[in-house]
Image (tube, rainbow, N blue to C red):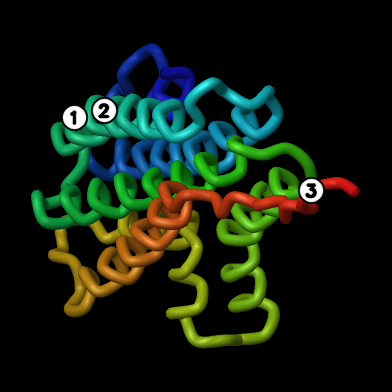
Amino acid sequence: MVSWVFAMGLEPPLQPSSSVYTPAARMLLVSLVIGGLIGWPLLRLSSEIPRRPLASALLDAATLTALLQVLLWPLRLVTSWPIARTLLIDTHGIIWLLITGGAVAIATAKEGMIRIWMMLLLVLWLGLPPLLSNSLALPPIVAKISPLSQIWLLASGGPAAPPPGAWQFPIVELAVAVVLWWAAFSPRPSIKVADPGPSR
């Protein structure tokens, strides 16, 4: 909600139009991505181990997904995004939250360096692809790996329909989310202590 007020303001513009609101909506989505993919795991990975790490991560992901719906779909009233573009943004956002939730579920169940490494991976996921793409002149598809770059491009598309092949990215991202949650739900191997036998 703070992101909404910061991006949209408390008072409407003198001449409200989609060209005025679209940049604010884009900044709102960028701030939501940073909050959901950096702020949420940073909070959880800095706290003690919850009693039920998987249930806690699932509940967090469900809550943030519901909040995303409340904030995203009303933007169609002030932007020129078609339903297909808004649905693509929504799908990306849900899957990104699932990926982050899987990482949180894996890391919060333990203590130690795994929390630091998982947080570092999430930060690199957002920042490294656009940095490499800009500094090394890599193909634009590299920058699209980052949710920040992806949401910026999608929110800048205006009334145009999503480009061909735009739905391939969510499929790949969903596969990553499935792998993370599979790892989170996999039972931990138990360590058996060998029987020393009867004492003599």
Name which residue type carries label 2: Ala
Horizontal side of residue 125 vs 163, given as left or right:
right
Q: Residue 21 at x, y = what percent?
A: 30, 36
Q: Is residue 166 above or below residue 76?
A: below
Residue in the picture at 39% in, 44% down? 97
Q: Secondary structure at mark 3?
A: loop
Residue in the picture at 44% in, 70% down? 144
Q: Is residue 66 above or below residue 91?
A: above
Marks 3 and 1, how far apart in space?
Answer: 72 Å
Q: Secondary structure at mark 2?
A: helix
Q: Earlier in the sequence, mark 3 or mark 2?
A: 2
Residue in the picture at 64% in, 57% down? 121
Name which residue type carries label 1: Pro
Quarter assignment of residue 168: bottom left
Residue designated by label 3: 198
Q: Nearer the viewer, mark 3 or mark 1?
A: 3
Q: Is residue 155 above or below residue 41?
A: below
Q: Are marks 3 and 1 in contact (CB under 8 Å)?
A: no
The one of 47 and 120 positioned closer to us in this rendering: 47
Q: Are marks 2 and 1 in contact (CB under 8 Å)?
A: no
Name which residue type carries label 3: Pro
Residue designated by label 2: 66
Quarter assignment of residue 50: top right
Query: Residue at the right extreme?
Result: 200
Q: Residue 55 at x, y = what percent?
A: 40, 29
Other-residue count near label 2 (Cα within 10 Å), few / some / many at <14 / 14–19 / ≥20: few
Horizontal side of residue 193 vs 153, given as left or right:
right
Residue designated by label 1: 74
Query: Residue at the top extreme?
Result: 10
Dot label at residue 176: none
